[in-house]
Image (cartoon, rainbow, N blue to C red):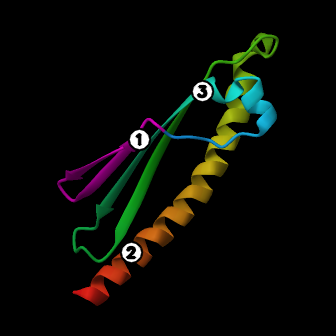
Amino acid sequence: MSVQPTANGISITSNQCVIEASQQVKQLGLDERYQVNVSVDLVSSQDESTLEARADMELLVDVPFPFSLTPTPVFEAGGSLVVNAMMTAMMGTFTESVVADYQAWAKRC
């Protein structure tokens, strides 16, 4: 993971994301057939009164046979739904954590 300052915020990137898998998935080695890359940018407004979070997630999957015979658009459509649902859930939790961390920090200052 890397955290880099930007002109009006920070950028957080990671290409070592882990998705917990069931024992069956692990036994088949399917948990090693993907890579997840995530990028989150936190940007303050011009008057610095609000903080906006933007996120991108890239999911690369090595689809095993016989599933690899499925047309790519079918996988992409289903994958997009799953990734969007994951991002919505993660961003809600992430922004709540940022707010809680900021409030704790502000009380100490």
Q: Quadrant of the N terminus?
A: top left
Q: Which residue is mark 1?
A: 14
Q: Which residue is mark 2?
A: 101
- State the mark number for residue 34: 3
Q: Main secondary structure of the magenta part?
A: strand
Mark 3, secondary structure of its residue: strand
Distance from Cα at disc 3 to Cα at disc 2:
31 Å
Identity, as a three-letter code, of the amino acid under mark 2? Asp
Q: Quadrant of residue 7?
A: bottom left
Tag 2 or tag 1, which sits nearer the N-term?
A: 1
Residue sitting farthest toward the bottom:
107
Residue at disc 1, secondary structure: strand
Q: Is residue 81 magenta?
A: no
Front-most of 37 and 51? Answer: 37
Estimate the x, y position of residue 51 in percent, counting from the top left.
35, 68
Tag 3 and tag 2, C-beta contact below 8 Å: no
